[in-house]
Image (cartoon, rainbow, N blue to C red):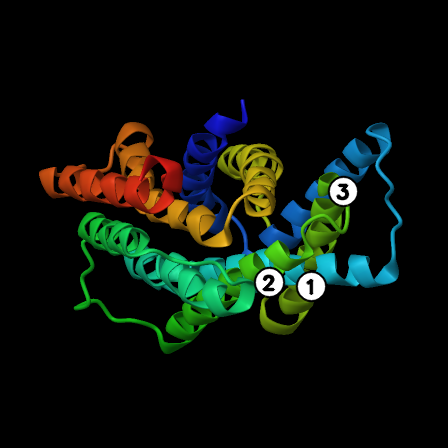
């Protein structure tokens, strides 16, 4: 079962871009994220209670989980959704955030002593090249300076959150850790909502469906799998999976949103797949 987690993670995480587009069209970004993670908090706490997981641990561990929640659900998601809301081209946001596996691999060596082989660097390079090919970046478009700043902050936040989570893995039960992370994300987005935006949520059918998808499949599904993969594997290999998100999202947009899928996209998908395979394969198979 756990062998299928990487594939399941890619599919669920990639699908977030499909429903996220609908949500931002019907709600201000920080209000939508605060609403989402408020519900996610309740869900994980209920699960932890019925699983007999210890909810109240050491204050130090709770604060650590809150901090990773702020990085993942506050600064990373808040930055991306804010950038979308002010007109930042989605492809450019995706390209900048796609740098995360490279940045994580560079830092995981000195921080955790993880050795990145030359084969892994070849795979990482191919993964990035394939992702850029699929995204088809058009830098002729006007880029909002605040959108660019928010996206760069999002990149550093998800990188820092991933490395920090690897260091903290095992301090709390997974469901409890996810609950406190959701609390951190909810509170941080509430703060941003009150400071920066005229908050609104239109509970349209598309918003309800999109938010349900984000909560059930992305927060409860994809994010939980990500935390599990970070705990069980090397952080470098886990984050390399993110290279498959842009091409997978492109395929999903073609299937569900009737967006164009070109031959170049397919070539980029194949290059990325080969790169991720090389970067994540077990050493015993290399």
Label 2 – label 1 distance at C-alpha: 6 Å
In the displayed structure, 177 sits above or below 109; it is above
Tell whether label 1 touches label 2 (CB within 8 Å): yes
Comparing labels 3 and 2, the label whose residue is closer to the camera:
3
Residue 223: image location, x then y, percent: 57, 42
Task: Pick whichever of labels 1 and 3 is earlier in the sequence.
Answer: 1
Residue 94 versus residue 271: which sits nearer the camera?
Answer: 271
Disc 3 to disc 2, C-alpha distance: 19 Å
Q: Position of residue 195 (x, y in %)?
A: 65, 73
Q: Are marks 1 and 3 in contact (CB under 8 Å)?
A: no
Q: Is residue 17 left or right of residue 248?
A: right
Q: Which mark is residue 173?
A: 3
Mark 3 vs 2, N-terminal side: 2
- In the rendered image, which quarter contains the N terminus? top right
| Residue 120 appears left or right of 16 | left
Is 191 displayed left or right of 276 in the figure?
A: right
Local packing at callout 2 (Cα closer than 10 Å; few below 14, some 14-19, many 20+) is many
Which numbered tag is attached to residue 67?
1
Name the spot of residue 148 as percent of width and height, x first.
37, 72
Specify the quadrant of the image occupied by residue 29.
bottom right
In terms of secondary structure, where does tag 3 sit?
loop
150 shown above or below 273? below
Vertical position of residue 91 compared to residue 198: above or below: above
Left or right, 114 with respect to 173, comes to left
Q: Label 2: which residue? A: 71
> Would residue 43 be visible to someone looking at this image?
yes
Q: Secondary structure at mark 1?
A: helix
Can residue 78 be seen in this snapshot?
Answer: no
């Amino acid at each position: 079962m756990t062998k299928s987690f990487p594939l399941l993670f890619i599919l669920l995480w990639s699908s977030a871009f499909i429903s996220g587009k609908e949500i931002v069209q019907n709600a201000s970004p920080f209000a939508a994220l605060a609403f989402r993670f408020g519900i996610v908090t309740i869900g994980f706490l209920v699960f932890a209670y019925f699983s007999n997981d210890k909810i109240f641990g050491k204050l130090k561990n709770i604060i650590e989980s809150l901090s990773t929640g702020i990085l993942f659900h506050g600064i990373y998601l808040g930055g991306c959704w804010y950038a979308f809301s002010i007109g930042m081209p989605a492809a450019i946001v995706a390209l900048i955030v796609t740098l995360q596996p490279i940045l994580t691999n560079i830092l995981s060596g000195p921080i955790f002593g993880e050795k990145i082989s030359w084969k892994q660097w070849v795979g990482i390079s191919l993964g990035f090249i394939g992702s850029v090919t699929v995204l088809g970046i058009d830098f002729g478009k006007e880029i909002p300076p605040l959108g660019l700043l928010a996206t760069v902050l999002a990149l550093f936040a998800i990188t820092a959150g991933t490395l920090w989570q690897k260091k903290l893995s095992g301090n709390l039960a997974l469901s409890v850790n996810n609950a406190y992370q959701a609390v951190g994300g909810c509170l941080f987005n509430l703060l941003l909502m009150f400071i920066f935006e005229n908050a609104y949520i239109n509970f349209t059918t598309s918003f309800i469906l999109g938010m349900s998808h984000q909560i059930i499949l992305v927060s409860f599904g994809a994010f939980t799998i990500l935390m599990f993969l970070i705990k069980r594997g090397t952080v470098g290999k886990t984050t390399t999976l993110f290279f498959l998100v842009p091409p997978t999202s492109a395929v999903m947009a073609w299937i569900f949103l009737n967006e164009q899928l070109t031959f170049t996209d397919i070539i980029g998908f194949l290059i990325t797949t080969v790169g991720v395979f090389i970067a994540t394969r077990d050493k015993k198979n290399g």
